[in-house]
Amino acid sequence: MGLFDKLFKKEEAPKVETVKGGLYAPITGKYIALEEIADGVFSEGVLGPGCGIEPEEELVVAPCGGTISSVAETKHAVGIAADDGAELLIHVGMDTVDMNGSGFDLKVKEGQKVVCGQTLLTFSFAKIKAAGHPTTTAFILTNPDDVGALALDTGKRFNKTEKIGQIG
C-alpha cells in the first residue's frame, strides 16, 4: 500500500454474516421496549414499531444492507431502505433536532449504498447531555404494513452488529 492509499484509505465495514430479514444492533447498548422511550411520538408507535437503545458508545452503524434514504439536516437521524424492503429510522437522542447538528458527524449521504456494520454517524454524549437531552435512541421500522411483523429482542445489552431481531 502506497502513501496515497494510506492517506485516503476508506473505512472498511466489518464483515457481518446476515440472514434475510435480519436486523442487527446499530449501537452497542441496552435495548429497551418502545414504550420505555420518554417521547410519545416514539413510545406510542406513531412512526412504527421498534425499540429504544440506551447507547454505551458514540457510534451508529448500519443495522442491515441497503441504501441511505434520508439524513436529517441536523445530522441526528438516518433513514435506511433495506435491501429486503424494510424502511428503518435511527434517531439519536430525544429532541436532538434542537442541537442543529452540533455534536453529530454524518459519515453517509442520501442515496449511498451501505452494508451491515458500516459506520453511519458518530455523536457526542457530552454535547447531547449539555443540551439537556436524553441520549436514548429510537430504532423504528416505518413501513410494517409493507414488510410484515417486527420481532425485536429487548431488555438486554447488545454489541453493535449482533442480531437483535427479524422482520417478516
Image (cartoon, helix red, strand yellow):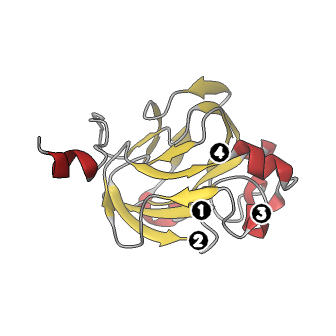
Ranked by sequence position, the earlier of labels 1 and 3 is: 3
From this view, report whether residue 109 is shown above or below residue 59: below
Q: Are marks 3 and 2 in contact (CB under 8 Å)?
A: no
Question: Which is nearer the N-term, disc 4 or disc 2?
Answer: 4
How far is disc 1 from disc 3 in space, using C-alphas? Answer: 15 Å
Instruction: Tell which circle, 1 or 4, labels the residue nearer the N-terminal end.
Output: 4
Residue at the spot 31% in from the left edge and 36% down from the top edge: 14
Amino acid type of the residue that numbered disc 2 sits on in the rendered structure: Ala
Q: Nearer the viewer, residue 127 or 90?
A: 127
Q: Residue 159, how many percent across, how many down?
A: 51, 28
Alpha carbons under labels 1 and 4: distance apart: 15 Å
Disc 3 crowd, CA 10 A, few/some/many (<14, 14-19, 20+): few
Return the x and y of residue 1 as percentages of the image width and height. 11, 40
Which mark identifies residue 33?
Answer: none
In three-dimensional space, the C-alpha distance between marks 3 and 2, rounded to whole angstroms, equals 17 Å
The crowd level at tag 4 (other Cα within 10 Å; few <14, some 14-19, many 20+) is many
- In the rendered image of this protein, does residue 110 appear above or below residue 40? below
Secondary structure of residue under mark 2: loop
The residues bearing labels 1 and 2 have C-alpha atoms spaced at a distance of 5 Å
Which residue is tagged 3? 41
Q: Is residue 168 above or below residue 70?
A: above
Sequence-first tag of 3 and 4:
3
The kind of residue tagged 3 is: Val
Q: Nearer the viewer, mark 4 or mark 2?
A: 2
Q: Which mark is residue 77?
A: 1
Tell me the quarter of the picture where residue 41 sits: bottom right
Residues under numbered marks 1 and 3 in contact, where contact means CB atoms less than 8 Å apart: no
**Mark 2: few, some, or many residues within 10 Å (few <14, many ≥20)?**
some
Do residues under tags 1 and 2 come within 8 Å of each other at their CB atoms?
yes
